[in-house]
Amino acid sequence: GLALGTPVPGSNEMHLIALDIDQSELVDPVKSLLFDVPQNTKTAHVAKRGKRGLTIFAIAESGIKAAKLGNADGMGVEILAKGNQTVLPPTVHPDGMPYEWVDGVGLLDVDLVNLPMVDEHVVATIRQLVQGPQSVHADIVPANDNSPIVDQLTYLGDGQWQHAEMVYPGNVHD
């Protein structure tokens, strides 16, 4: 397998990571988060497909840690970083299905410094997509009446996002 968290040639500070997306409904929102933003418009799209979901390769500063982000439906997105590895195409999965590069573009076909950048904000947003708005505790702040305000992000499709702040009053009973 490919060891992740390794330094990217040509960059002292960036490391190779992968976002292993297991739930198909999370693929488009994560892709939009990575590629539909001004700073990543010219990034290389490198991903592999297996039995389900997608694994997108990216770069990150060394502070990004491996994480397993799940919800009631199971594993949503696994951030594969230092200490993790992933198999590469054309490896055959134990169920007999071979892994394949999406659009025929593999890691050897691109300059790795052109992969999308993942930072703590991207990780927090992915966590919110997978686990819901309550998962991003840093964005919960008390309102003037000490009711928490929850910052909720919703993917609408076609690269469109809806951002809303919602107040949850502590005691709604009379």
Image (cartoon, rainbow, N blue to C red):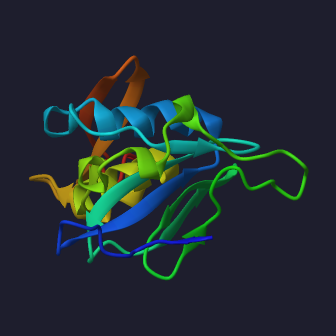
> Image check: 168 left or right of 54?
left
> Image check: 123 left or right of 139?
right
Instruction: Say if residue 170 shows up in the picture.
Output: no
Q: Write the residue at 43% across / 79% down.
A: 82
Instruction: Say if residue 30 shows up in the picture.
Output: yes
For the N terminus, the image quarter is bottom right
Horizontal and vertical percent position of residue 42: 21, 33
Horizontal and vertical percent position of residue 57: 43, 52
Q: Write the residue at 32% across / 71% down.
A: 64
Which corner quadrant of the image does residue 60 belong to?
bottom left
Up the image or down, 23 lies above or below 6; here it is above
Up the image or down, 7 lies above or below 93; here it is below
Up the image or down, 15 lies above or below 141; here it is below
> Image check: 4 left or right of 85?
left
Q: Write the residue at 37% across / 46% down.
A: 172
Q: Residue furthest front?
A: 109
Q: Write the residue at 39% across / 17% down.
A: 158
Q: Residue furthest top?
A: 158
Horizontal and vertical percent position of residue 140: 25, 57
